[in-house]
């Protein structure tokens, strides 16, 4: 970690800038939420790409729901960590602040983070798989575990699906538009994401092309490490704590 560059970042953060943070699963790792890639991320030998797709759900909704039901139970037992706390503080401190999260666990919301843009939806929301006319587009349901899987739509009796964005599905157009606008900022953080899933990872390029000072916080190098202004290699909960302490 370069002190000069960290000082540069601190200087930029002191001048009431427009700050945007993009987070991924690494931010919740210290809380005990499994990440999607790397050691310990497989569930029953399945990768996220095997389960988080409409075709996987159409083929075996019970299997896909077993994974989400398990994730919901894990997350329900987890507590937000120092990284969530620091980001929440920034969201209240800086007048022009945005958090774009790929995380579906709801931990940013649990520490009252202002204005969260949920890029990949929420594991705590559900919707009717066949989109019946009587059901809202999606709604909150924090039952964990569900008494039987797959859970059923209370409106039509069909199958419910998790309220997340799967591979091959589009990002909510409004969320995408607001996230792209947010990426055109002064200081852009990309924290705890492998930066391999697009369009989320493309937000870094949008920020850089706009002229933002870009900062990566991650325990490992990623495909965006070479394109950001500053790499702070380390755990998000430690690095953000350090930045917050230095900001005073
Ligand atoms: P990944 O599991 O792909 O990446 C997690 C990243 O966090 C890795 O780069 C790790 O090095 C890093 N990491 C781990 N512990 C960390 C810590 N304590 N502090 C900082 N970094 C740490 O998760 P995402 O990038 O979020 O999408 O995955 C992106 C998307 O792929 C997810 O939103 C999900 C998944 O499939 C969908 O389901 C559509």
Image (cartoon, rainbow, N blue to C red):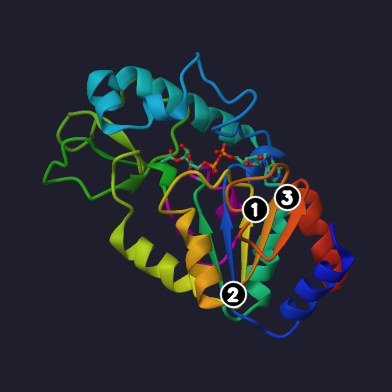
Q: Is residue 118 magenta?
A: yes
Q: Is residue 49 magenta?
A: no
Dot 3 beta carbon under 8 Å from ligand 1: yes
Helix, strand or loop under label 3: helix
Q: Is residue 91 above or below residue 126?
A: below
Residue farthest along the top direction in this orientation: 44
Q: Nearer the viewer, residue 240 or 148?
A: 240
Instruction: Report whether 145 appears left or right of 54.
Output: right
Q: Quadrant of residue 190?
A: bottom right
Q: Which residue is mark 2?
A: 212
Residue farthest along the left direction in this orientation: 133
Quadrant of the rendering where the C terminus is positioned: bottom right
Q: Which residue is mark 1?
A: 225
Q: Quadrant of residue 69?
A: top left
Pair 3/1: label in front? 1
Instruction: Report whether 4 appears left or right of 122.
Output: right
Instruction: Report whether 105 appears left or right of 16.
Output: left
What residue appears at the point 62 percent right and 45 percent down from the top-left corner? 222
Q: Nearer the viewer, residue 176 or 85?
A: 176
What residue appears at the point 29 percent right and 61 percent down from the top-left corner? 173
Labels 2 and 3: the sequence-earlier one: 2
Residue farthest along the front direction in this orientation: 226
Q: Give the residues drawn in magenta, as a range.
A: 104-119
Q: Nearer the viewer, residue 171 or 84?
A: 171
| Residue 38, x across and y down, in percent | 61, 29
């Amino acid at each position: 970690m370069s002190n000069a560059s960290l000082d540069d970042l601190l200087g930029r953060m002191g001048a009431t800038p427009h700050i945007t943070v993009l987070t991924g699963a690494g931010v919740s790792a210290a809380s005990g939420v499994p990440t999607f890639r790397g050691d310990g991320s497989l569930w029953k030998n399945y990768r996220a790409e095997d389960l988080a797709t409409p075709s996987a759900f159409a083929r075996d909704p019970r299997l896909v729901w077993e994974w989400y039901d398990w994730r919901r139970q894990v997350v329900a037992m987890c507590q937000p960590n120092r990284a969530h706390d620091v980001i929440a503080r920034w969201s209240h401190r800086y007048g022009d602040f945005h958090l774009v999260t790929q995380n579906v666990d709801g931990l940013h919301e649990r520490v009252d983070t202002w204005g969260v843009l949920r890029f990949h939806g929420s594991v705590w929301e559900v919707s009717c798989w066949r989109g019946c006319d009587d059901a809202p587009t999606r709604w909150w349901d924090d039952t964990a575990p569900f008494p039987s899987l797959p859970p059923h739509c209370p409106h039509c009796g069909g199958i419910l699906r998790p309220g997340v964005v799967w591979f091959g599905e589009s990002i909510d157009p409004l969320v995408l538009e607001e996230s792209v606008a947010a990426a055109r900022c002064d200081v852009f953080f990309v924290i705890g994401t492998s930066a391999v899933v697009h369009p989320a990872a493309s937000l870094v390029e949008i920020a850089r092309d706009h002229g933002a000072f870009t900062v990566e916080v991650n325990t490992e190098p990623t495909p965006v490490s070479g394109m950001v202004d500053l790499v702070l290699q380390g755990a998000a909960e430690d690095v953000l704590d350090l930045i917050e302490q230095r900001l005073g």
